[in-house]
Amino acid sequence: MSHYYSYKDYMKTRYGEPLYRVPVDFNSGCPNRREDGSGGCSFCSLKGSRSVQTLSVDSVEDQIREGISFVKRRYGAKKIMLYFQAYTSYFTPKWQTKYEDLFRRFEFDALSIGTRPDCLDNSAIDYLEGLSKRYDLLIELGVQTSNNKTLDRINRGHSYEDSREAIINLSNRNIDVAIHLILGLPRESFEDYLQTVKDYAKLPISGIKFHNLHIVKNSQLAIEYEEDRFPLLYEHQYCEYLCNLIRYIPSNIPIMRISTDSEESDLIAPKWHMKKDQFKNYFERSLILSNYRQGDLANNRGEALPSSEGFIPNIEDLKKNYDLSIDVYENFIKPSNLESRIEIGDLKILDIGFGAGYKILEAIELVKNSKNSLSITALEKDRRVVLSSSKYMEYPNHSFNNSLLELYNNSRSKYKGSDISIYFGDLRYSLTKLNCDYDIVFLDSSSKPKNLEALTVDFFRELKNIIKDNSVVVTIDSSLPVINGFIKAGFFVVQIFNSFLKKRGVIAYLDRSNILSNQSLENKKQLSKRRDLEYRDPFFIWSSKEILRDREERLL
């Protein structure tokens, strides 16, 4: 079962199969613009929200004819929705005549009309009510945000109260309404996005489209951005926000869109490296690993509810996906020289790949009587594993189960005097959030399949920015791509061998002087073999399969 209610699923439920949209562009202009087309919302270009498919076709009749032919030919479409998308739809007698002329000429199954809250007076709603009795009708309102200061700042021309009134008036006539929201508007924060979602989730809406803000050419916002490069949302942060926001949207409201489309030639920023389908897959995977579901923090009125646990892996799932047999003392604690280091002063450990928490538990137990303190930051991509471990794993001290549950719920805990904080989500994005100088790094790649995202030269270069010069990085992966990745990132690498377990591991140092006399430096030996064997992930967006495929292609 999907973790959110997609528009495709909604369409299948309502019509029995997908409904394909055919965009219609009357080039109708916008009441928020001057006669010459200037003015309007600061984020909007002279093209308005015109679809790419309609830009090269002048006649509305030809647009519809070619659009229907295209979706039938390419997708085998059987059900069609006419979508009046570009600019703003008006409902004066003149425009009603134009609409009715089209409705007589073409057959379709549903009708979607995009407009503004300030274009919906009583006469307009009267006409739309009549349409809704003849066709399956959806009105789409660009409301963007519920923050009136932002609406003024972007020259939207209406208030949140106007939007709320329009939605209620349409709903009172049994007309379905979907809203468009923009995340990333200037000076807005996640708290603003959340308030907007909560405000609109309480209203009688039938769908939500999310757009990440795009700065496009020939817009007022492009001028403002040139003068003041305010922060924009890129893939990882936008996905994190979106995953959290849909938890407050009732599960019966379809999420019709999760990202923005703009022509590449028009887009100034942000320029994502993920393609549309790639981001969709990333978003859906992030929801699963976070154990989030649409509506798990909201009821049908958009009010907060206790969080749902969702799917919890059982002990067999843990054994299947994580190597729980690893001797963490021999493979991580001992090679890090933790016992000697803690006697010198306070230590900060970064645990990448927290899993069931065994490395941290062993470290804390080892230094619990030390006069110096140990603080831990952990990164874990699968939040469900921590919850499952808290419920099913049998630790020597049951209080650690309680600490795991606290980490799952609050991302912070304290165990035997040591502070533990954890970042859930994409390990690469989590790494960029850190600004602490760590003394010891445990890099655990024992998940199955192997998590290559944290074993690339690009990940190691980012890691260098948050560790001390005399720090040590310990991993149980001694494969050639990992060793070469460390070396190319500027580390000095030695291999270690656990004679009892007959396994090799790697210790990476930034300072060569930290290498012990009995340790053999690998830098020259490995680089002399092959210089292109390391794993790469230059934009932190590839999956493990894509990272592996890239390396294989470079080996050809």
Image (cartoon, rainbow, N blue to C red):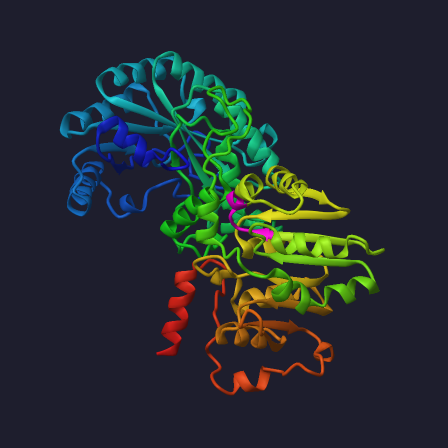
Q: Answer above or below: position of 508 versus 53.
A: below
Give 521 or 233, whichever is nearer the viewer.
521
Q: Quadrant of residue 19?
A: top left
Identify whether 378 is placed above or below 122: below
The magenta segment is: 379-385
Q: Which x, y percent locates residue 147?
A: 58, 29
Q: Is residue 321 magenta?
A: no
Residue found at x 35% / y 79%: 556
Can the viewer see residue 434?
A: no
Camera-nearest residue between 475 and 130? 475
Q: Position of residue 530 (x, y in %)?
A: 47, 83
Q: Is residue 6 left or right of residue 311?
A: left
Residue 388 visible in the picture: yes
In the image shown, does 242 or 140 lie closer to the viewer?
Answer: 242
Q: Position of residue 7 (x, y in %)?
A: 34, 34
| Rendered residue at 48%/49% (across/down) | 318
User: Residue farthest to the right?
Assistant: 371
Residue closer to the observer: 354 or 509: 354
Q: Quadrant of residue 337?
A: bottom right
Describe residue 409's horizontal placement relative to residue 179 as left or right: right
Q: Residue at x 53, y 68 (%)?
A: 477
Q: Residue at x 55, y 86 (%)?
A: 525
499 is higher (above) or lower (below) than 21: below
User: Would residue 380 be counted in the magenta stretch?
Assistant: yes
